[in-house]
Amino acid sequence: MKTFKPNLNTQDPEFRLKNKRQQYHKLLLSLGEEKYKSVIIEGTFPGKESTMQLTESQLDTLIFEAERRMGNRGQEVKHRPLAPDNNPEEYQIKQLRNKCLQVLAERGIKSTPKDWQPVNKELEAPRYQWILTDEQRAQGMINKRGIGTFNTVESLRKLFYQLCAIRDNQKVISTKVTDKAKQN
């Protein structure tokens, strides 16, 4: 006895319409045009103000036009990353944090999305407490927030150079130890 798989193109028409409305909305979000949705719809189809009033072919027209504006017709729509033009300082902070985490990872201090404990423990060391004010250090406070405390370009740049120096010193020490071990 043969069984046939249902054809994927025979979906419920309401289900197809719902998916196309969602696709169009995602395109508008990616383009940053979601607030102009009703204006675009009315300009394209006079008398219509919502995607709920449109037919499938009308939705196809809107999707086609949005994909054309997007410049990547037929490709999956992805959110655009934060561009340096939008907020250069925030972009630079993210880059510096990433570089600091890379240097820590080179030293074997790695974090996971759910466990920042190794990074936080390292940044609790006395050599990184310069981030605190004199008053906070006098009170005996310790940086418990990890890399989040370093929230300016200047402090992250200083931390990056400090971490690089520590990494490089550890490499020099380990090569000296291995050289002496080879000599013995």
Image: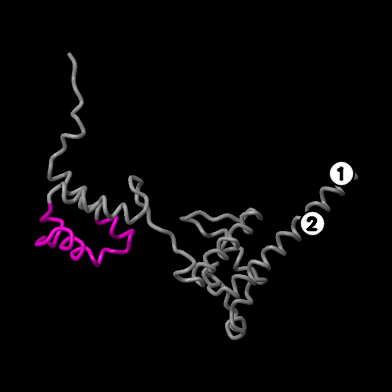
Residue 182 is labelled as 1
Disc 1 residue type?
Lys
* Quarter placement of the N terminus: top left
* Quarter placement of the C terminus: top right
Instruction: Tell me where the magenta segment starts and ends, as one range.
Output: 25-54
Q: Residue at x 12, y 45 (%)?
A: 14
- Residue 73 is a magenta residue: no
Disc 2 residue type?
Val
**Farthest top residue in view:** 1
Q: Secondary structure at mark 2?
A: helix
Residue 83 point in image, percent of width and height: 46, 64
Q: Secondary structure at mark 1?
A: helix
**Occupied quadrant, residue 168:** bottom right
Magenta stretch, main secondary structure class: helix
**Occupied quadrant, residue 106:** bottom right
**Farthest right residue in view:** 183
Q: How many marks?
A: 2
Q: Residue at x 82, y 51 (%)?
A: 177
Q: Residue at x 58, y 60 (%)?
A: 101
Local packing at callout 2 (Cα closer than 10 Å; few below 14, some 14-19, many 20+) is: few
**Farthest bottom residue in view:** 135
Residue 175 point in image, percent of width and height: 80, 51
**Occupied quadrant, residue 51:** bottom left
- Up the image or down, 182 lies above or below 25; here it is above
Residue 88 point in image, percent of width and height: 50, 71
- Up the image or down, 184 lies above or below 167; here it is above
Question: To which residue does mark 2 refer?
Answer: 172
Q: Are marks 2 and 1 in contact (CB under 8 Å)?
A: no
- Up the image or down, 113 lies above or below 95; here it is above
Residue 128 is labelled as none
| Left or right for 33, reference 171 | left
Q: Earlier in the sequence, mark 2 or mark 1?
A: 2
